[in-house]
Amino acid sequence: MITPALPLLESAFDQADIEAQPAAGARALSAWMYREGPIAEVERSAVFARHWQYLGHRSQLSTDGDLLMASLGGTDVVVVRSAQGIRGFHAVCRHRAGPLEPCRGGGTTFLRCRYHAWAYGLDGQLLSAPEMRDAEGFDPASIRLPEIEIAESEGLIFGRHAQGPATLEDVFTEISPRLSRAGHRLSDLRFHARVSYDIDCNWKTYIDNYLEGYHVPHVHPTLNAILDYRSYTTTLSRWHSLQSSPLDSAPDAYGSGEVLYYFIYPNTMLNILPGRLQTNRVLPLRGNRCRVEFDFLYREAPLANDREFSDLIQQEDIRICEDVQRNLESGSYVSGLLNPTRESGVHHFQELLRADYREALRVGQG
């Protein structure tokens, strides 16, 4: 649900900044939209509450009692597997907003608040609350964790807080056939590790950078040596974009074959390579920073040097994104013309953002 008050929306947007931009002459989002301010609250409700975001892989929830913790639109959540299937809940105690953590006792798994030890079952129902028996109006049966919407495709588990404009099936309508033709079975992969980076840039700055190969020859010399930049293409769909390129032989880094870089709006990346998958989630943080979570999944054993090579590319991206962010905040730059061939993915992402901003204004104006 889009909830920001109208005064907040009106103070956040200049209508000209959020009008649709034709691809041929599109300009990038204005610099002020990458700074701290009311726009962050607008994005929290208009973007991150309504759209699907990757939370984990089915291999992390293989048996009843398995669970994983994640962040969804700034809220801590837990995804659990039980006899009722896979469900998701806010990982925030209903008592005084304490953080929940997984615990095991008596052969069962439950969630326990680290603040005052309230306990919840994997169905979200309160199980116990120490020393609360004499509190007037205390009714354990009425206390439950708020539930989030969960859906799965290709073995990937996504969540969202509120109903949005597309089902997860809509999002994967063109992705699944493409993966099938290429022989990629993401559901057969196994989760191996997660690596996180906290970066001094707005979340949109990082995603803009991901969505174009224009910078690869200049920022990523090692990656450029194994990608065929001349054959690097971007394909646009309603809710995702795909960057793809043939790989030259690089057995110690990426392997050989084809690399597929999927971006699923608003903040999920699927980097699909021979025999493996890297997922990226870009999470806004306070202070106009972001966290990028990398999950590494493999069909068999991890490829030698895979994480080291990924870290090399990531450090190069971090340096350029942080430099760009400083310039966005300097007052020197307002907005520039996008390259219609090399930056079509950036334009696609920013048009989806503009549409959500316009919807927020429409709802706010009643």
Image: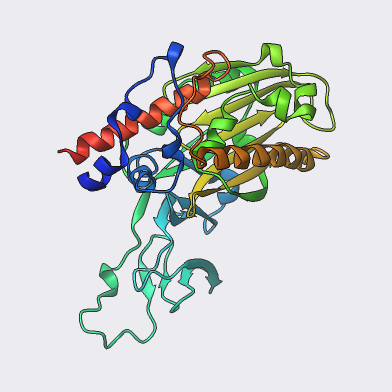
Q: Is residue 198 visible?
A: yes
Which image quarter is the N terminus in? top left
Residue 128, position as x, y percentages in the image:
38, 77
Residue extending farthest to the left is: 366
Task: Tell me which residue sits at (35%, 29%) in the image.
Answer: 17
Residue 329 placement, left or right of 47: right
Figure disc tally? 0
- Residue drawn where x is 49% and y is 37% of the image: 204
Which colour style is shown? rainbow
Left or right: residue 311 compared with residue 52 = right
Quarter location, residue 221: top right
x and y, in percent, of residue 199 in the image? 60, 48
Instruction: Classify 84 as above or below 223.
Output: below
Report the front residue among 217 and 294: 217
Q: Is residue 229 left or right of residue 200?
A: right
User: Going by the image, does 191 lie left or right of 364?
Assistant: right
- Residue 256 falls in image quadrant: top right
Residue 190 in sight from this viewpoint? no
Q: x, y percentage for residue 359?
A: 27, 33
Residue drawn 47% across the image and 71% down it: 112
Where is the C terminus found, in terms of image quarters?
top left
- The image shows residue 158 at horizontal and vertical percentages of 47, 41
